Structure formats: structure tokens, C-alpha cells
Image (cartoon, rainbow, N blue to C red):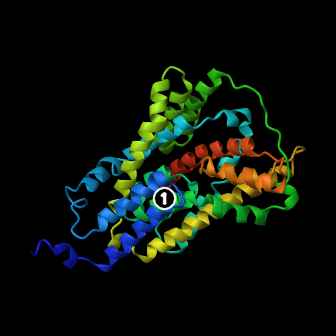
Amino acid sequence: MESLFSGILAFQWQQGAMIIVGLVLLWLAIAKKYEPALLLPIGFGTILANIPLSAAVGQGGPMQILFDAGISTELFPLLIFIGIGAQIDFTPLLKNPSMLLFGAAAQLGIFVTLALATLLGFDLKQAGAIGIIGAADGPTSIYVANRFAKDLLPAISVAAYSYMALVPIIQPPVIRLLTSKEERKIRMDYKDSQVSKPVKIIFPIAITLIAGILVPASVALIGFLMFGNLLRECGVLDGLAKSAQNELTNVVSILLGISIASTMNGTVFLRPETLLIFGLGLVAFIFDTVGGVLFAKFMNLFRKHKINPMIGACGISAFPMSARVVNQMGLEEDPFNFLLMPAVSVNVGGQIGSVIAGGLILALLGSL
């Protein structure tokens, strides 16, 4: 009889609060369709991890085994990068390579947040891991947090994926604040030129070599991303490319979410630091958007053919949500203002920029 009611007797308020958090994540995933591939397994895993005396967690528990195998070894985030690389078509960026600059400008939030987190009492490595939330790239956030701030991994990962899902809510007010109606109406021509197959094949190899030589700490991140893209573009492994895009990404996303949830027990998650991390994550996203938009306005000072500054906001890695948001905002101002392809060009550049930014943080802070 004692064992029958031991779960009830062991129940603590922190576990109840975390079960509610899990239910909220499930609601966001199912009802609002916010990043359901990650938030649903994280939400359900949070419930599993906070049932009193749960056999799913702890030494020998299946969720702990998955965490040790996939998160501690950094395997799951890297496998996700293969799938992301296989899904991304870099053709719009190759048609207009200058858009890659926005992928660098829109990482401003990472470094602003790093400085702010340090001022709020986090050490440099923890601040770097929190700042990477601004990369709008869940796998990169998990990868860096696992290196620098394992105790903050649950809050950082949930914040990263939550804010990625909230891009349609976060970015429009910031963009409107920084741009005039006339700027938002600027139309952009899209180059309808062809990109040859050899160029598409050479691109992921060249990016890996250049980024790897300049920032060796980024090799794992950029290498797995570009390997996935090479699977897509090489033309001789279509079956593997489709498997990477679908089966691999889907399966690893489930395992990644469940693994992260294994660490989301109440005593770890329900701390003042968690609220600070969520606040800093929002700051990172806002300043990423600010950096991209202001960089576009700066470029317009020297250009004859003006850029619609809204596309600068797509320099974050939230692909393709940010591009869709900007395109919709352009259509609201002018029904014939189609910004999708320029926005996508910037958005895929942001994917590269976020990975390199993650490598920079690893390189700059790794020796401390």
C-alpha cells in the first residue's frame, strides 16, 4: 500500500508547477502550432520528468540515457544540422551574395545580450550561452549551452525555441518602430538568373573551408550544416537527402525534445535565473532585428537602388518564418510589393551567420 501511494506522498509543489509548464508547452504546440516538432516532445517530456518518483528519469532512466547519448555528446544538435542543411536551398543567396552581410549584422543581439547578462551577474561563459538565444537557432543554442552552461540548458533551449515560434509577434512591432511607411513600401527587384549546379555543389564546401579556417571552433556546426546541403545539391544521393530532410530530422527532433525535458525538474527550472534568461532571450531577438534593419538603412545611404530595410530583420536564423513575416508586412503596405525572395536570401544568410556566431562564441570564451 505504501508503494501504491508513494507518488502522491512524494509530490512537491515544484513538480506540480512544472507539469503545468509542460501542459502550456503542449498547448502552444498543438493549439497555436508554435514549433510543434520540439515543443510537443519537450512539453510531454517535462510531464514525464516531474511525475514523483518517475522511472523515466534519473540514473538508468530512458530519458537520462537519451540525454547522455545525444545531448552530452552533442550528437543530436549536429544531426539536426544535417537535416536543416538538406532542407535549405541557398540559390536565392547565391543570386545575391551581398545579402549574406545581413546574416552578420543581425547577430547584434547575441553580443548585446552577452554584455547585459554579464552585468546581471552571469559569468562570461553562461552569458555567451544565453546570448546565443539571439541566433534564433535552436540546435546552436543547445550546442553552446551544453559546452558552457549545462545547468542553464533547459531554460536556454526552451527560450530559444519559444522565441523562434514567436517571431511573427516579436518582429513586426520592432520593424515598424524603426522604419517609415515609405521605407516599408520600397519594392525590390529579384534577379531571376540561373545558378549552375557546380556552383551549388562548390558553395557548401567553400563555406565549410572558409568558416572552418577563420573560426575553427565552428567546424562541427558549419560542417554538419553544409554536409546536409551537399547531400541536397550533389544530385547523386537524392534518397539520402530526402531521408535527412524528413526521417532524420523528425526522429532526432523527437529524441532531442525528450532529452532536453529530462533536465526540466522543478528545483532546476524554477529559479530566478530562468526568468532572467527568458527576458534576456527577448532582448537578444529584439536587438537582432534592430541590427539587421539599421544595417539595411545604413546601406541605403550609399545605394542608388534602395533596399527595403524590413528584409534586414530576416538576418536572424528563424528560417523561413522571418521571411514570411516580412513578405506579409510588405503586402500590407502595398499589395504588389513582393519581398519574399529577397527576404529568403537574407534568411538563409542568417542561418550561416548564426552558426558562425556560435563558433565565435565558442572560440572567444572556450579558453577562459
Q: Residue at x 48, y 23 (%)?
A: 237
Drawn side of residue 95 relative to residue 297, left or right: left
Q: Residue at x 68, y 49 (%)?
A: 323
Q: Quadrant of residue 211?
A: top right
Residue 228 image offset from top left, x and y in percent: 50, 34
Pick out the residue farthest to the front.
31
Instruction: Give percent across and percent down for residue 14.
Output: 33, 76
Type of amino acid at the residue the image marks with label 1: Ala
| x then y, percent, for residue 348 | 63, 42
Q: Note whether residue 86 is visible.
A: yes
Which quadrant does the C terminus fall into? bottom left
Which residue shows up at 68% across the image and 50% down it?
Answer: 324
Residue count near mark 1 (Cα–Cα under 10 Å), binned few <14, some 14–19, many ≥20: many
Judge whether 155 appears above or below 141 on screen: below
Nearer to us in this view, 290 or 112: 290
Q: Foreground: 167 or 269?
A: 167
For the point 60% across and 50% down, the residue is 317
**Can you say which quadrant of the picture contains the N terminus?**
bottom left
Question: Compared to 174, does 95 lie above or below?
Answer: above
Circle 1: element type: helix
Residue 213 can be seen in this image = no
Query: In the image as oriented, which residue stretches furthest toward the left?
Result: 1
Which of the 4 image quarters holds residue 281? bottom right
Q: Position of residue 74 (x, y in %)?
A: 38, 47
Q: Which residue is mark 1?
A: 29
